[in-house]
Amino acid sequence: MFDLGWTELLVIGVVALIVVGPKDLPILFRRVGQFVGKAKGMAREFSSAMNDAADESGMREMSSSLNKSLKAATNPLGSAMDGVKSAASSLTDLDPDSETGKLAAQRAEDVKKIQASTARAAAERKQREATEAVAKADAAEAELKPALVKKPASNKPAAKKAAPKAPPAKKPAAKKAPVKKPAAKKSST
């Protein structure tokens, strides 16, 4: 209502001190406080009376519906999702005797048939791959058998050819300790 800052209150206080005087200033502030208290009490009574009248006339329900519509206006995505959820919940409750229910049942059967045929085709493919793998393994085993049956010409084990030995790594020469010079003899004179 009135916007009074600290500077305005200070100016009002200084003017009141000059006009009223220091002796009557506490009495003036007490009366102003009583007046403000009465005004707040009257405002409180008025707002409670208005709230009671709104409750009796059904304005609360209207205000709550107004709040919902305002919420929908400010958040259209949320309200749209609420509408989609309510529509989806109504679609799940199908009457089995209606055309939609019959189509849903037929689609469910078709889905089951497709899944069964897909599973059967996968099983046949796996079986075909397994038989091909067995056939390849048998062919590889047949190729290896003649090589395993051959015996070496002599009964002696084949001599291994020795690989040429690498020369041993050279070790670094040890450092010689520095030669110490003999100490000079002291002459006695």
Image: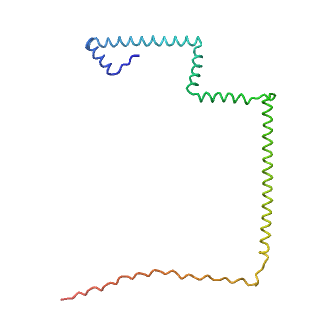
Vertical order, 55 against 154 (above or below): above
The residue shown at (79%, 51%) is 123
Q: Which quadrant is the C terminus positioned in?
A: bottom left
Vertical order, 170 against 140 (above or below): below
Q: Which quadrant is the N terminus positioned in?
A: top left
Colour pattern of the rendering: rainbow
Q: Nearer the viewer, residue 179 or 144?
A: 144
Count of numbered badges drawn on the protein? 0
The residue shown at (28%, 85%) is 183
The residue shown at (78%, 54%) is 126
Residue 81 occupies quadrant:
top right
Residue 22 place in picture, x, y as percent: 26, 14
Residue 89 place in picture, x, y as percent: 70, 29
Q: Nearer the viewer, residue 169 or 119?
A: 119
Vertical order, 12 against 179 (above or below): above
Residue 55 occupies quadrant:
top right
Residue 172 located left or right of residue 130: left
The residue shown at (59%, 83%) is 164
Residue 59 place in picture, x, y as percent: 58, 14
Considering every residue shown, the one lying at the far left of the view is 189
Q: Nearer the viewer, residue 19 or 130?
A: 130
Residue 29 place in picture, x, y as percent: 33, 13
Vertical order, 156 against 116 (above or below): below
Residue 28 located left or right of residue 144: left
Residue 171 located left or right of residue 185: right
Q: Nearer the viewer, residue 52 or 126?
A: 126
